[in-house]
Image (cartoon, helix red, strand yellow):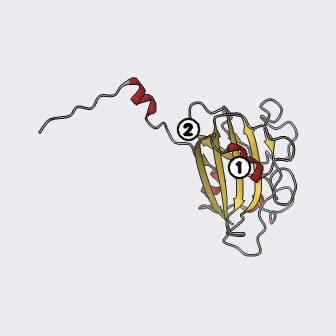
């Protein structure tokens, strides 16, 4: 039986998987995977309908922009309800702070070409869930892309998903229950 040795060339090492893209939200983790009320339309006063804080790690090499889509995947199995669409997040951005959506001059909005898209209420930015019953899963999906997306005005989830086809370098997903 011949012994085979393992040799790693520079190209083999370069092709090895990098740290995978990860998406986290500490308030969701602290609530055992549940979306806290302040990020829903059922919150109270100023603590209502705020976009949740998100952080990500392991952005793949070659990433030129990031995109985020947040959907209620239990609203309608055929067509999930879209709560938030964000395109052209600069790749060196490490996350979006609590209440980021809708704030004028928020980090990255002016410098990196970041665009908040239109949700299924036909409004730009985050709109928290208010489903008719509890137990809905809210999916946060982050895409690392090899290019910036030129989407024009009124970015929608469908427009974004069509544009990123063939440009995805990595994906990360976080699901919270409401």
- Of helix, strand and loop, which one carries label 2? loop
Horizontal relation, residue 120 to residue 9: left or right: right
Callout 1 touching callout 2 (CB < 8 Å): no
The number of discs equals 2
Up-down: is 62 above or below 168? above
Horizontal relation, residue 116 to residue 76: left or right: right
Question: How far from the left and from the top, in percent, is residue 74?
Answer: 68, 69
Rate crowding at label 2 as few (under 14), some (14 to 19) or many (20 or more) other CA atoms within 10 Å: some
Horizontal relation, residue 20 to residue 33: left or right: left
Residue 10: quadrant of the picture: top left
Q: Look at 87% across and 43% down and name the residue there.
A: 153
Q: Look at 55% across and 38% down and name the residue there.
A: 58
Q: Residue furthest left?
A: 1
Q: Nearer the viewer, mark 1 or mark 2?
A: 1
Q: Look at 78% across and 37% down and name the residue there.
A: 150
Question: How far from the left and from the top, in percent, is residue 157?
Answer: 75, 52
Question: How far from the left and from the top, in percent, is residue 18?
Answer: 48, 36
Instruction: Please report whichever mark, 1 or 2, sits nearer to the chain's N-terminal start.
Output: 2
Q: Residue furthest bottom?
A: 133
Up-down: is 50 above or below 92? below
Residue ID for mark 2: 58
Gap between marks 1 and 2 measured at Cα: 22 Å
Up-down: is 138 above or below 89? below
For the C terminus, give its image quadrant.
bottom right
| Mark number displayed over residue 142 | none
Rate crowding at label 1 as few (under 14), some (14 to 19) or many (20 or more) other CA atoms within 10 Å: few
Residue ID for mark 1: 161
């Amino acid at each position: 039986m011949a012994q085979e040795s393992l040799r790693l060339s520079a190209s083999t090492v370069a092709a090895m998987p990098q740290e995978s893209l990860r998406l986290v939200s500490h308030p969701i983790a602290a609530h055992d995977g549940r979306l806290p009320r302040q990020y829903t339309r059922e919150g109270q006063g100023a603590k209502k309908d705020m976009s949740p804080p998100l952080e990500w790690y392991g952005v793949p090499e070659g990433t030129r922009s990031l995109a985020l889509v947040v959907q209620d995947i239990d609203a309608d199995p055929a067509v999930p309800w879209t709560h938030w669409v964000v395109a052209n997040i600069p790749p060196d951005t490490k996350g979006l702070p609590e209440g980021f959506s809708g704030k004028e001059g928020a980090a990255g909005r002016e410098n990196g070409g970041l665009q908040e898209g239109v949700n299924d209420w036909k409004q730009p930015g985050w709109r928290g869930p208010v489903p008719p019953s509890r137990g809905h899963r809210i999916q946060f999906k982050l895409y690392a892309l090899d290019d910036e997306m030129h989407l024009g005005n009124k970015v929608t989830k469908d427009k974004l998903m069509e544009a990123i086809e063939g440009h995805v370098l990595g994906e990360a997903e976080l699901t919270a229950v409401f």
